[in-house]
Amino acid sequence: MIRRCWNSTTTTKTSTKGTGQHLSSVWSHLTTIQPVRGKGIYLYDADGTKYSDFTSGIGVTNLGHCHPKVVSAIQEQVTKLHFGQMNVVMTPQFIELSEKLYDITPDGIDSFFFANSGAEATEAAVKLARHASGKTNIVVFNGSFHGRTTQCMAMTTSKYIYRENYAPLPGNIHVTPFPHSYYYGWDEKTTIDFCMKELHRLVVSQTSVDETAAIFVEPVLGEGGYVPVPNEFMKLLREFCDQHEILLVMDEIQSGFGRTGKMFAVNHSGVKPDIMVMAKGLGNGMPISAVGASTELMSKWKAGTHGGTYGGGNALVAKAALATIDAMLEENIPARAADRGEYLMTKLRGVQDRNPILGDVRGLGLMVGTEFTDPITGEPAGDIAKAVRTGCIENNLLILTCGTNDHVIRWIPPLIVTEAQIDEAVDVFERVINDVTDCFSSDEEGMG
Ligand SMILES: Cc1ncc(COP(=O)(O)O)c(C=O)c1O
């Protein structure tokens, strides 16, 4: 017997306008705010209520909402050309963008493929790595997030919800421990030694080096908890990949474009990746992603075996990306992010000193995580982090969590955020922590 899990008998359509009832329920919503305008770090709804957007749309609007240079670039392009399909023509705006990316990416990255989303670019990087190496297997880190398509789900281990009930997923993906000292409770050196040891074990126990095409790594673990890869580990990873002829793929989708205080997070270690995957901050809100590699490596990706209608086609999006990069360079945005990031971390460490529930404050530039840990049990305090997130939102501060138990509040404001705006947000955060922890402790007292 076939089991039905839906009811198709409803025939009369009724609708309540403006409620979102026709949006798929697969989307979770942090809030029900309906912004009609965005400027700088703020979003405004139809009533004019102002919200501080410390989510940057999950790391997208690095220059803030509606940056004037991006707005003019789109306006200038809009009457000229919208679309030039890359298999039909050579869209000049994307030629220009590939040249601009060549200028700002690490040495050795000089050829670019374009797509629309981070997941698409990750999938493309997997295909490139397999074609170029002739090998099948991919290694990812525990806690990683690489996207939501079927291939990317198989590479994502930050939370089971991203893969739950979606089996079967593509195979040949192997998972190795991420160097997260705070999680293991070890010093950095012990953690690095352990993770390298496990990586060596992986290639003798699960995936031989002859079958391993690539290692994918987020230079700052994003959805998995905002944890920077120690520079020393990144260097060892590079050595390991060189030694075994494995491609090192940097997923800079969330950490790229000034976010960590340098144009790309991998620049902190000086390591040169073989492949780089970029999205989010590249278009400052316009959907665009890119895969970069050496011309030599790209030439091994057989022409015609990959592509897509829209990738490298939308001239408005390319112009927005060009303007975004220009603005980043002209306004010295990565250095500003480094500066403001230090300011934010110092303030948050002050909050940590006064609030033992904050177990760890860490990050690079303006990619900062505050991890909530029960000071008595040492367990991740996801309930408290989520209650703090709710309290911040009630105070018009939009903020996200991450980490396996949603126990880390992530700080990713637009990189143009000022010290005064940081002060205001951190004040709200601390006030809410006090309220929430008071409330949790009185609940416990009540339970006897
Ligand atoms: C590190 C990383 N990789 C990949 C992705 C997937 O990007 P997208 O949501 O654009 O498909 C994300 C999205 O959050 C990400 O943070």
Image (tube, helix red, strand yellow):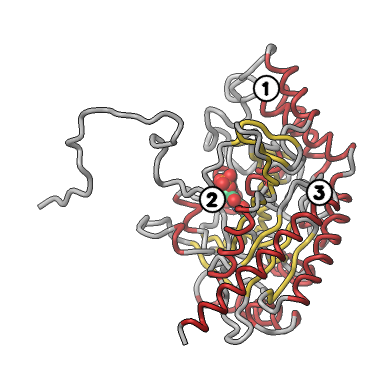
Mark 2 closeness class: few <14, some 14–19, many ≥20 residues within 10 Å:
few
**Of callouts 1 and 3, the N-terminal one:** 1
Pointer 3 and pointer 2: residues touching (CB < 8 Å)? no
Q: Is residue 32 above or below residue 255?
A: above
The kind of secondary structure element at disc 3 is loop
**Of callouts 3 and 2, the N-terminal one:** 2
Distance from the alpha carbon under mark 3 to that under mark 2: 29 Å
Question: Which quadrant of the view contains residue 228?
Answer: bottom right
> Closer to the camera: disc 1 or disc 3?
3
- Of residue 331 and residue 439, the one placed in the foreground of this image is 439
Pointer 2 and pointer 1: residues touching (CB < 8 Å)? no
Asked if ligand 1 lies within 8 A of label 1, the reply is no
Q: Which residue is disc 2 drawn over? A: 30
Q: Which residue is disc 1 drawn over? A: 91
> Closer to the camera: disc 3 or disc 2?
2
Q: What's the residue type where badge 2 is placed?
A: Leu
Which residue is depicted at the point 67% across and 24% down? 316
Mark 3 closeness class: few <14, some 14–19, many ≥20 residues within 10 Å:
many
Which residue is depicted at the point 64% across and 59% down? 222
The kind of secondary structure element at disc 2 is loop
Q: Is residue 116 above or below residue 175?
A: above
Q: Which residue is disc 3 drawn over? A: 263
The kind of secondary structure element at disc 1 is loop
The answer to whether 386 appears left or right of 342 in the picture is left
